[in-house]
Each structure stands twice: as C-alpha cells, then as structure tokens.
Image (spheres, rainbow, N blue to C red):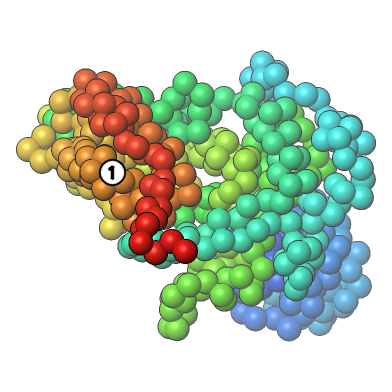
Amino acid sequence: MNFSTYARNEREFIEVIQAFLVGPWTEDGCVKRAKLATGKSYRFLRPFIRRMIAAFPNPTHADRLIHFAKADTKLVEALSEEDEFCVVRKFYPHAVMAPHPSAALWNVPPIRNSTELIDRLRIDAYQLEWLADRAGRNQREKNPTLRHYYHNWLLRPTGRPRLLEIPKSILKTIQQRILQLILDHIPPHDAAHGFRAGRSIKTFAEVHAGRAMVLRYDLKAFFPTVSTDAILAVFRTAGYPPEIAYYLLALCTTRLPRDVWDARPNAPADGSDHFEGTQFCDRHLPQGAPTSPALANLAAYRLDCRLHGLAKSVDATYTRYADDLAFSGGEEFRRTTDKFSRCVAKIVAEEGFALNLAKSRVMPQSVRQQIAGVVVNIRPNVSRRDFDELKAILTNAIRHGPASQNRKQHADFRAYLTGKVAHVAMLNPFRARRLYSLLDRISWQAPTAITNPGTEM
C-alpha cells in the first residue's frame, strides 16, 4: 500500500474515534459503534479497543485517543495492510461543556487538582482511587462485603421491580459532601420542582390547575438513563478541570455487578431486559445515593430548556417533578395536542431519555386531571378515592387497633399515617382537619395480655 492510501485510512480512523465517545465506554459498546461507523467488522478493531480502554478506564478527550491510536504500532500496521477503510457513517460526540461565565456566580469551591479534591472531601489518595473505581474493579468483585453499594430489589404491585443502590457509609459521607459543597449551589431549570428546597408536588401541580387541557408524561428508568456525558458536563460547566470532573463523576455513579442483575426477582427468560440490564451495568446514577436527585435535575437542564420552549410556543406551561412531565394550556393548546405529543417524544428521545407510554395521559377538563397523584381540575387537591381510603384506615385503626390496618408491614406505621395526613394537609388543609382528629384518637399502645385467673398455679 502506498503512503497516500495509508494516510487516508488514518484520517478515516480518526473519525471512528468520535464513535467511541458517543455511548457506553465498554468494549462491546465501542465495537458496535465502530461497526456502524465503518459498515464492516475489522479484526483489528476489538484488540485495539481493548488496549484503548485499558489505557483510559474512563472516556477522555478525542485528542488523547487520537494520539494514543497514532502511537499504537499494531493499529498502524493493521491500517497499512487494509486496501480500503471506508467510513460510511459519521458520529458527532456530545459536547463536553467548558466552564461557563455564569458559573462564576455559583458558590462552588475551586478545585484545581486531585490534592485539593482530597482535602475538600477529607479523604486520602488511596480512598479516592478505591471509591472512584474508575477501572470498574468493584463491579467484578464477587464478595458483596467489599462492594461500595448495598443492592435491594423492591417488588411493586405493577411493573418491574425497582432497584435501590444504597452507598455504604464512607462513600455516602463523601457523596453528601459533594452535594453540600457543589451540587446544592448549582441552580437547576426553573421548571424542575422535584428534590428542591421550597418546591414540592404542590408547586409542581398548582400551575396546571383550572386549565382546559393537561398532558402528563413519565420518563422511563429516569436515573439509569441520565448519560454520563451530561453528568460530566455539569462539573465541567461549574469550572472544574477534566481530571476533577472525572473523579466527581466516578464518585457519584456506579456499575451494577452482573450477578445482582441476574438475581433480580421475576427475571424474564426471553432476554427482553437486555437493554435495561446494559444501562445498569454501565456507569449510571444509583437510585439511593444522596447526589443522584440533584445530578439528575442538573443533567436534565437541556431537556427542561427544550420542553419549556416547546410549551411556550403554544402558550402552554411546563413543569417537571423528577420523572413526571406535565403540560397544560388553553384552547390553542388543546387543538394541537397530537402534534405536540409527537414533538415531546422526539425531544425526549434526542436528549437520551425514553417515555413510558403506558403512563402518558391526555386529560381535558371533562375527566379527572391528575398529575403526580394531585387532582388539578379546579385547584390542587387529593382525589376522593385516596381521601376516603385514608379516612377508612384511620377509622378502623381506632376501632380495631393500628396493627390491624398495617397490611404492608410498615416499620413505623404511625409515622407513615402521619405523613399521609400531612400530604392531604399540604393540598387541602380544610379536609385534613377531619383526618387529624381521627389520627389523634388512635391508641398506639399494644394491648396487654389478659391472664385467666382459673389457669394460675
């Protein structure tokens, strides 16, 4: 092969490098995207990708990968032997944001290197490397006591079980420091109402009360689908250099061990959960970590911007509470709901999320308009069914004792009922008065055993 042909192949391979950076940083993921980019399976690609991931356990800048590729003698030799190396599809990497001028107003501490990060988090260098687990060794650890997270599958009456990944004490403490030092000082989009001080389900729902049309959507598997690129962009936008941003990303995300996924309850045998399993086994936000709610809000900033703009274009209102999306408007909005729904689905997909179509609702005023459990036909209110059910539980707890009503075996049933009544009071204080009076009449003392005198010895 002459030099010009090799040079062309080298330039085209540089374009393949872009494909490595637009998805999961795994061997199989990079191989799959390289095949899509080139339109062919090349034998030298997988060994090179394996060497690349060994050299860079986490995604890095394309320039560093290009420099590594040019210095890889086995790759250079393979490209020289190819008569044709044709890129049929180009990939454009997600922009990793640089520090933004507006971030100067955020009260986040400057951290310029790993030494300063260690000081801020009050750990040593060994703990930083062990807990960040950038090489993914923790995922392959067979002993659960040496893993960084507790894993708990929660069965639900409907749908798939929910996975809780709860960090162990040391990692949890570090995540709480990241939350307090950094994430609490970065403002999410104004449309976000979940996991924010001063915001609640009531503030999420009340702006949609009394509207001609309300649309409700649900994001499927919200935390696992938040991309690591978006999380990395949060820390880069705040002004942290790439090395620190990668460390913070690694401390706030995890990879699920394969044996935990395989042991999930009611695992289907047809392999239909492969995509969801891949999401969990790649780096993702764990549901149970103190940093995950704030990072999910911040990572969805561009999604919120686009959906807010879409709603504004038809004189509608948009709010989001975690994975619940709500839109409402007047007659103009009502006439465009079909086209509007298609636009919402398109934007959500482009931002890397997916809609749970089974939970999507189009609700004119002629039906009960309910979002996140709040009825908004006239004003924010609890549904009559929920109110009557709670009232019946409280009444029966007075008559037969609270243990008779604790059918779901809540550890602190008194706190559970108090929380349910407080939720009603937040939405409708007048209706909650009756419930509070019933709650006060419940006897929480366990009944004492009655001894039969005739059986005493």
Three-letter amino acid code at the position of disc 1: Ala
Q: Residue furthest left?
A: 366
The residue sitting at 51% across, 24% down in the picture is: 197
User: Relative to residue 189, is residue 219 depicted above or below?
Assistant: below
Residue 145 lies, in percent from the top left, at 76, 64
Q: Which residue lies furthest to the top in this view?
A: 105
Q: In this orientation, which residue lies closer to the viewer: 145 or 323?
A: 145
The residue sitting at 74% across, 56% down in the picture is: 148
The residue sitting at 41% across, 40% down in the picture is: 445
User: Relative to residue 369, is residue 454 depicted above or below?
Assistant: below
The residue sitting at 78% across, 46% down in the picture is: 170
Residue 238 lies, in percent from the top left, at 69, 29
Residue 102 lies, in percent from the top left, at 64, 20
User: Relative to residue 236, is residue 402 depicted above or below?
Assistant: below
Q: In which quarter of the image is the N terminus?
A: bottom right
- How busy is the neighbourhood of tag 1: few (under 14 within 10 Å), some, or many (20 plus)? many
Q: Is mark 1 on a helix, strand or loop?
A: helix
Residue 14 visible within the image: no
Residue 112 visible within the image: yes
Please give the residue where the numbered disc 1 appears in the rendered image.
Answer: 397
Is 279 placed left or right of 426 in the picture? right
Residue 130 lies, in percent from the top left, at 84, 54
Classify residue 56 by image quadrant. Answer: bottom right
Classify residue 43 by image quadrant. Answer: bottom right
Q: In this orientation, which residue lies closer to the viewer: 123 or 64?
A: 123
User: Relative to residue 10, is residue 410 depicted above or below?
Assistant: above
Q: In this orientation, which residue lies closer to the viewer: 453 or 107?
A: 453
* Count of numbered badges drawn on the protein: 1
Q: In this orientation, which residue lies closer to the viewer: 397 or 199?
A: 397
Is 42 placed left or right of 217 in the picture? right
Is 394 placed left or right of 144 in the picture? left
